Amino acid sequence: MLLENAPLAHIPLTNLLGIIGGIAIFLFGIKIMGNGIERLAGAKLKSILEKLTKNRFLGLLVGTVITGIIQSSNAVSVMTVGFVNAGLMPLENAVGVIMGANVGTTITGQLIAFNIDAYAPIIAFVGVMLMTFLKKRPWSDILYALTGLGLLFMGMTLMKDHMKVLAQVEWFTNLIRSLDGAPILAVLVGTVMTMALQSVSASVGVLQAMAMSGALGTNPLGIAVYLICGQNIGCTTVSVLASIGCTKDAKRTACIHVLFNVFACIICVILLQIFPGVLDFIARISGTINGGPNYAQQLANANTFLKIAATVLMFPLSSLLIKLSRLIIRGEDKLEGRRLLHIVGGKDFGSSVTAVASVEKETERMYGIALENLKKVYAALTAPRKNDLDGISENEETLDWLNSEISKYLVEINRNGLGEADARSVDQMHHVIVDYERIGDHANNIAGYVQHMRERKLSFSDAAMDEIAPLFLKVLTIVEDAHTCMENPKAMPLSSIAEREQEVDDLVDLYENNHIKRLSEGKCSAEIGMLYVEALTDLERISDHALNIAEAGQA
């Protein structure tokens, strides 16, 4: 019964390689099918998740539908953690999305149960061949997903064919028998299985292949149902890993994912012990195939039944899950941690959608910091107060750091392959973050001039103040409106920004000439005059960068 008493050599090498190769092709098929769907509809899915999760019930529906489309609960859970982290979705609404993702992921098992193995090579072949001719989007993305679908079923067939030998391997059959009637052990095995494969859809698919090959013995459903319960717990590791280094609410989102699946597993195990006839009912409604039980359909239906039942039972307890997550993840985020890149995403499916949304939020944060510095400098220039320049230099260093880190991250996510809309957004942000950083530089320059004047007990003349104060306010308004124009060109037309930017250029020329006249008349000193001209130049450059930002929204 123990593995060490039955060496792996009992499985013929050909079959062992076939099983490993089948799992590899199956996982690769899931991955590239998902990547194709993400590139095809990633930006739209992000928009749906942002806009259509106004309450928990709607979030439940959206989570179910989107996961059903992209075939990855991991992707949706990571997106949800990312959106909560970026402040795009409140924690209360994320609960419904997490539960919906668990239901939506059952579609993969149902798809596998259709048993279209014979057509899988044709599907993959058609996808690959057409990709060589149809290279433009969206056709290339559709064909990429189609190729992934074909590979998914080819891997499934390879696994199923080579797993048949497992039914004759003594140590393996003993292991399977040890799981029959031991639900806790089966749950633990299922948890480890999904942690290893990093995909609950893939784990259920492997179980279906084992059941169809006879490797799960004479009672595959009775064993697999508890393995599936464990697999649902194992899939939560992805969202937990994604939440590392994120905000408290993002960590609570991952915590809720874990709590939901653990409680759902406990409830389902208890109910199955009380009502064992449920499994007989699932077996009856699953029909037959080739004159025998349809084990693939039985496991698909059991997976669907368990997850729907768990969601129905746990959804009314959403508020309790939120309270428990707050007890486990205590406290709130510290506001002073400005040099922290709040970005979720990596190279897994669905992560680029999350990463783009996170970077957009970080770019918004750069705008907020740059605008804060401008307002502080304007106040220090026009209405001096004690310590009114504090924090400006630190903010400027934060902007420099954010510009550098976001640029690196944009290069990284661009390598993963993006949909057209996300690619445009990334290109826009490449330009915009530089402009926000430069606006911060110029604001810091003016703060330096103000500090220098205070140290030397210098001040602009009344005439100079009558010129520069309204000009500064005009530039501030242009920066705010330019950001609005970038986000929504209809709300603030580019032509308005361009006209006012030209007005700033003209006013700077006029004020410089006025300054030269005052200088020649002895109404101001050369030292203060130099600072005045430098401040005018900085304001002109700020309006130039604001126009660049507005133009980025038109690209």
Image (spheres, rainbow, N blue to C red):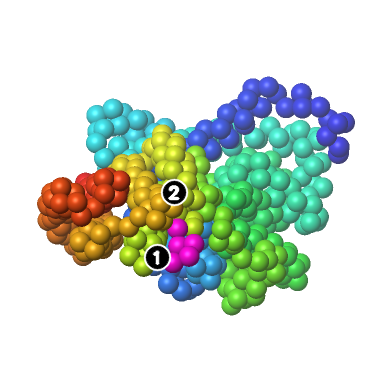
Residue at image position (40%, 65%) is 384
Quarter of the image where one finds residue 278: bottom right
Task: Determine the secondary structure under disc 1.
Answer: loop
**Position of residue 367 measured from the top left corner of the image (x, y, whole percent):** 37, 55
Question: Residue 387 magenta-drawn?
Answer: yes
Question: Residue 13 magenta-drawn?
Answer: no
Residue at image position (44%, 67%) is 385
Look at the magenta stretch and give its main secondary structure: loop
Please, which residue is most extreme toward the front here?
522
**On the rendered structure, is 80 left or right of 5?**
left
**Viewer-side residue, 194 vs 166:** 194
Extent of the magenta region: 385-389
Residue 332 visible in this rendered orientation of the protein: yes
Picture layout, residue 30 above or below residue 281: above
Picture layout, residue 191 above or below residue 56: above
Q: Earlier in the sequence, mark 2 or mark 1?
A: 1
- The amino acid type of the residue labelled 1 equals Pro
**On the rendered structure, is 43 left or right of 157?**
left
**Position of residue 392 measured from the top left corner of the image (x, y, whole percent):** 45, 54
**Position of residue 380 measured from the top left corner of the image (x, y, whole percent):** 38, 62
Q: CA distance from mark 2 to mark 1?
A: 20 Å
Query: CB of mark 2 within 8 Å of CB of mark 1?
Result: no
Residue at image position (35%, 30%) is 128
Q: Which mark is residue 384?
A: 1
**On the rendered structure, is 307 left or right of 7?**
left
**Position of residue 157 measured from the top left corner of the image (x, y, whole percent):** 53, 36
**Viewer-side residue, 15 vs 46:** 46
**What residue did someone put label 2 on?**
396
* Number of numbered discs: 2
Callout 2 crowding tier (Cα within 10 Å): few <14, some 14–19, many ≥20: many
Picture layout, residue 239 above or below residue 49: above
